[in-house]
Image (spheres, rainbow, N blue to C red):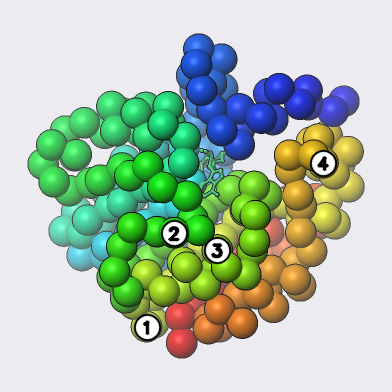
Amino acid sequence: MRRPQFIAEHARNARGLLGRLIAFIMARETWSQNLRAMNALGIEQGDHILDVGCGHGRSLTELAARAPRGRIFGVDPSKLMVQIAAQRNRPLVEASRMNVVLSSVESLPFPDNVFDKAQCVHVLYFWKDIDMSLREIARVLKPGGRLGLLFRTNADLKAMASFPPEIYRFPALNDVSAALERAGMDVHIVGHDANEPALVLATKR
Ligand SMILES: C[S@@+](CC[C@H](N)C(=O)[O-])C[C@H]1O[C@@H](n2cnc3c(N)ncnc32)[C@H](O)[C@@H]1O
């Protein structure tokens, strides 16, 4: 059955009470795929890490635990998600180990070459321009820095039928790989079964 459009709309831009409930459910629904991305990234203790579309911020907590000498940044364009993520991680934010910033991927509020790792889980469906967004992530990664990009592709027919296409755009894996290459990154696909989300690791050249 197709997810109602108003629920999908909150996954793209959560707000109000319903948005809060959806953030709560999302933090459970996406957890195993976030762990998959984090495990593949090979996080080191001193890494500076960016989570693009961090949503509820559950992964930010885990990233901070895996990089206890690094700094963790989450960005999200939903004011409600930023508020939830900052609240969830208040001690880390207060200790200046973490920042949660209201921003979308198209214009990241960071200088060039600052992050060792970045992750982005179930977010690219909502981007206006995949090329521009990947160039922006590549810009803020250090040379040799790594991105873990996790998303459902258009080969996942069940997902294609379940999520409203007006809101979710599932791309072809090859198109995203080509866009990563154009953004100056070397691409490595971590085993892709069409019915599972794809995990792409990309290293900035
Ligand atoms: C399906 S949720 C995934 C949240 C989290 N990454 C997870 O795995 O649970 C998608 C998130 O992407 C955010 N988002 C939507 N458009 C975005 C954009 N252009 N740039 C960055 N984040 C965006 C939404 O606000 C939402 O928090």
Label 1, on which residue? 143
Residue drawn 68% across and 59% down? 198
**Residue topped by disc 4:** 165
Label 2 sits on a secondary structure element that is helix
**SS label for mark 1:** strand
Q: Closer to the N terminus: mark 4 or mark 2?
A: 2
40 sits to left or right of 61:
right
Q: Which mark is residue 133?
A: 3
> Do the numbered discs 1 and 4 sit on residues whose CB atoms are within 8 Å?
no
* Disc number for residue 134: none
The percent coordinates of residue 34 (x first, y second) are 51, 47
Nearer the camera: disc 4 or disc 2: 2
**Mark 3: C-beta under 8 Å from nearest atom of ligand 1:** yes
> Whole-Å distance between the Cαs marked 4 and 2?
25 Å
Is disc 3 surrounded by few (<14), some (14 to 19) or many (20+) residues within 10 Å? many
Q: Tag 4, which secondary structure?
A: loop
Identity, as a three-letter code, of the amino acid under mark 4: Pro
Cα distance, mark 4 to mark 3? 20 Å
Q: Is residue 85 visible?
A: yes
Nearest to viewer (mark 1 / mark 4): 4
Which residue lies most toward the top here? 17
Image quadrant where one finds the N terminus:
top right
Which comes before the other along the chain, label 1 or label 4? 1
Tell which circle, 2 or 3, labels the residue nearer the N-terminal end: 2
- Give me the C-alpha separation between circle 2 and circle 3: 8 Å
Amino acid carrying label 3: it is Ser
**What amino acid is found at the position of numbered circle 1 in the picture?**
Pro
- The Cα atoms of the two marked residues, 1 and 2, are separated by 19 Å
Q: Residue tagged by mark 2?
A: 107
Q: Do callouts 4 and 3 mark residues in contact (Cβ within 8 Å)?
A: no
